[in-house]
Image: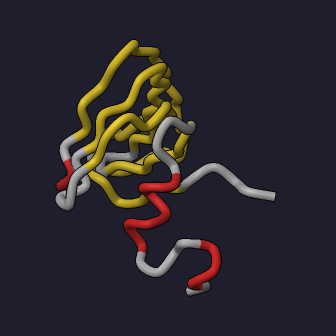
Amino acid sequence: MDPSSGIQEPFDLIRLSLSERVFVKLRGDREITGILHAYDGHMNLILSDVEETIMLVDVVDGVAEGEVKVAKRKMEMLFVRGDGVILVSPPSRT
């Protein structure tokens, strides 16, 4: 990683994303976007202005039919427990 950019380890990317909108992929086919306010070493996150997207697959007799439904909801604040976090994507920097 580039020492001149201030990024030397993965948590530096999260630190530089404080107060910015991030994308978070969670277990259970859930994704959220929100403004990152705080995090810790367990990847517990506190986000505001959150939109959650849940992908639901219809299952009939144990066989997935392939139809995916998308449910969305918005929340003012959300605490995300770190053990459910798969990926955190910082905002794109151009």
Report the residue at 22% width, 47% height from top.
Answer: 44
* Of residues 54 and 44, the one drawn nearer to the viewer in this rendering: 44
What is the count of numbered marks?
0
Report the residue at 53% width, 56% height from top.
Answer: 89
Residue most extreme to the front: 4
Report the residue at 38% width, 66% height from top.
Answer: 11
> Is 32 situated above or below 11?
above
The quadrant in which the C terminus is found is: bottom right
Report the residue at 22% width, 53% height from top.
Answer: 40
**Image coordinates for residue 26, horizontal then vertical, percent:** 35, 49
How is the rendered protein coloured? Answer: secondary structure
- Where residue 79 sits, quadrant-wise, is top left
* Of residues 44 and 1, the one drawn nearer to the viewer in this rendering: 1
The answer to whether residue 71 is seen in the rendering is yes
**Image coordinates for residue 50, horizontal then vertical, percent:** 45, 24
> Is 52 situated above or below 76?
below
Asked if residue 9 lies left or right of residue 44, the reply is right
The quadrant in which the N terminus is found is: bottom right
* Of residues 90 and 6, the one drawn nearer to the viewer in this rendering: 6
The answer to whether residue 55 is seen in the rendering is no
**Image coordinates for residue 10, horizontal then vertical, percent:** 42, 73
- Where residue 21 sits, quadrant-wise, is top right
